[in-house]
Image (tube, grey):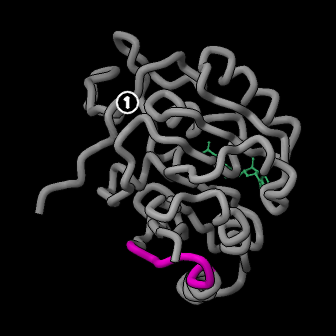
Amino acid sequence: MSEPALPDGVERREVDGEERLATRGEPVYGEPTADGWRAWDPERSKLGGMLELGFETGLTGGETVLYLGAASGTTVSHVADFAGPTYAVEFAPRPARDLLDAAASRKRLFPLLKDARKPETYAHVVESDVDAIVQDVATRGQADVAVRNARFLADDGRLLLAIKARSEDVTAEPDAVFEGALDRLREAYEILETRRLDRYHEDHLGVVATPR
Ligand code: SAM
C-alpha cells in the first residue's frame, strides 16, 4: 500500500544533508533550513511524527485549523506554513510570548491566550466548521478537551490528537490509559486510526477521528 500523500506545502526536501519533512517559512526553534524550507523535526512534534509514520491525517493544505496546546509554536508554525487560518490556543503566558514571535511572520496564524477546557471563551473568535483540530495539550483530561472542542469541527473534519499516557496517570499501563481516553472520545467522535508514536514520542498515542 502506498503512503498517504503529504499536504500541499509539506515536502520531503534535502535540508542540512538529509532528506527531511519540511515547510516553507521563517525558522522558529533553531531548525535547519535550506532555500526557504525549514526542517520539521518529528522528534519535537507529535503531528510531524504522525506524518512521518504515514497516518491518514486528511490534511491537504489550505484548511482551517484549530490547534490546542500550541506552546511556543514549534508545530503550529509548521501548520500555519501550509494551512489556511490557524487558531492557536495556549494558556501559559510564557510560551505564548514565543508563539507571538512565531506568528509575526505568519499572517494566517492567530495566537489565543485561552484555556482549551473553556471553548466558550474563544467561540466568538474561532470560525465554526474548522477542517481540522490538532491537539497536543499533554495534561490530564486530554480526551475531555477534544470532546469539548468538537463543536468547532466540520462534519467531515478531522481530529488529529496526541495522547500522552503519563499526563493522565504516571503509574498506569499506557494501553489502559489509551483505552479509557478512546472511550471518552467516542462520546463525540468516530475513531478512524490509532497508532503509538513511540518511534518519536514515548508512551504517546496518535489518534485520527471525525465527528459522530
Ligand atoms: N504542541 C506543541 C508543539 O508541538 O509545538 C507542544 C505542546 S506541549 C506538549 C503542551 C502545551 O499545552 C503546553 O504549552 C501547555 O501549557 C499547553 N496546555 C495544556 N493544557 C492546556 C489548556 N487547557 N489550554 C491551553 N493550553 C494548554
Return the residue found at the far left: 1
Give how far across and how far down residue 48 sits, in percent. Answer: 44, 46
**189 part of magenta stretch:** yes
> Cβ of disc 1 within 8 Å of ligand 1?
no
Give how far across and how far down residue 107 sits, in percent. Answer: 61, 19
Return the residue found at the far top: 35
Q: Determine the residue positioned at 53% across, 58% down.
A: 154
Residue 105's place in the image compared with 160, above or below, is above
Q: Amino acid at mark 1?
A: Ala
Name the residue that disc number 1 marks.
22
Q: Determine the residue positioned at 67% across, 64% down.
A: 151
Give the residues in magenta.
185-192
Residue closest to the eye, 185 or 178: 185
Residue closest to the eye, 110 or 177: 110
Residue closest to the eye, 186 or 36: 186
Residue 152's place in the image compared with 110, above or below, is below
Quarter of the image where one finds residue 2? bottom left
Q: Determine the residue positioned at 69% across, 69% down.
A: 142
Residue 63's place in the image compared with 145, above or below, is above
Give how far across and how far down residue 180 sits, in percent. Answer: 62, 87
Give how far across and how far down residue 105 sits, in percent. Answer: 62, 14
Quarter of the image where one finds residue 146? bottom right
Q: Is residue 53 left or right of residue 142?
A: left
Residue closest to the eye, 185 or 102: 185
Q: Is residue 5 left or right of residue 73?
A: left
Q: Secondary structure at mark 1?
A: strand
